Image (cartoon, grey):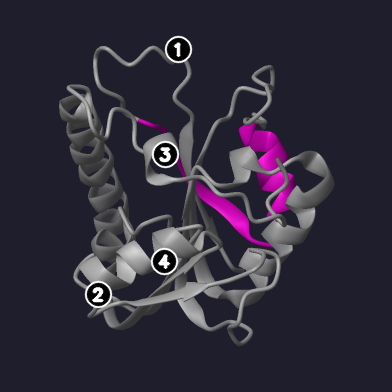
Amino acid sequence: MIITSKPKYGIENVVAGFNGPAITQTLHRTYIEHKQIRGILRSILGNRLFRHSADIGCGYGRNTPLIAEFTRTSTTGFERDEDFVQIAKTNMPELEFKQVETLAQLPALDARFDLVFSFTVLQHVRDIAVNEVIEELKRVACSTILICEETDPTWRDSTTTGRSINTYTELFKPFRLVYKSQRDQEPNCPSKNPGHYMVFEKP
């Protein structure tokens, strides 16, 4: 799967157990993720707020309102799947969501966003396309990029391409890696390597 295409994910393929008993695990995972992301953003900002933020590959907006908590003026979610964008707009009309054909061409000005956030998106981008997407993230970021991705380079299957922290450090240059931490996970998560959060700052 290449990020520049626009697959039809469908809610049932993205939210584990959305219509079954495993929804409790999904909710617990979301709580753990939000707690960790809040901690990272507070450590970056202190008592400040970002002016403008972007959630790249936002899906149906699961993390977008969290990013908005740390943003003073505007938060924008970019997503390829039209159904996800409609769900996000319906549930969160106070936020801006834009449907795009590709994450490698975002309808935003250079250095538009103080924070560019992307959660487990790049790990689903094949090597042939990942440079283009990362260059676009760097183009629209004026200061901070926060990503969470699979960092085990041996994990490569039909949907996931793991890349090491060192690889992401090289790909995001001239942005500098200033923070990394392993992604927390629920106790019964089957993944042995849940990946890492990484913060990059523009020099």
Position of residue 172 relative to residue 193, above or below, is below
Question: In front: mark 1 or mark 4?
Answer: 4
Q: Residues within 10 Å of mark 3 (few under 14, many from 20)?
A: few
Q: What element carries label 4?
A: helix
**Disc 2 from disc 4: Cα separation:** 29 Å
Residue 85, numbered circle: 4
Residue 82, numbered circle: none
Residue 48, numbered circle: 2
The mark that comes first in sequence, 2 or 4, is: 2
175 in magenta: yes
Amino acid type, residue under disc 4 in the picture: Val
| Residue stretch in magenta | 164-183
**Disc 1 from disc 4: Cα separation:** 32 Å
The mark that comes first in sequence, 3 or 4, is: 3
Amino acid type, residue under disc 2 in the picture: Arg
Q: Which residue is drawn at 33% across and 59% down?
A: 61
**Disc 3 from disc 4: Cα separation:** 14 Å
Mark 2 and mark 4 in contact? Answer it, CB < 8 Å. Answer: no
Amino acid type, residue under disc 3 in the picture: Val
User: Which quadrant would residue 31 be assigned to in this image?
Assistant: top left
Residue 192, numbered circle: 1
User: Where is mark 3, residue-wise?
Assistant: 14
Does residue 70 show up? no
Q: Which residue is drawn at 61% across and 87% down?
A: 109
Q: In which quarter of the image is the N terminus?
A: top right
The mark that comes first in sequence, 2 or 3, is: 3
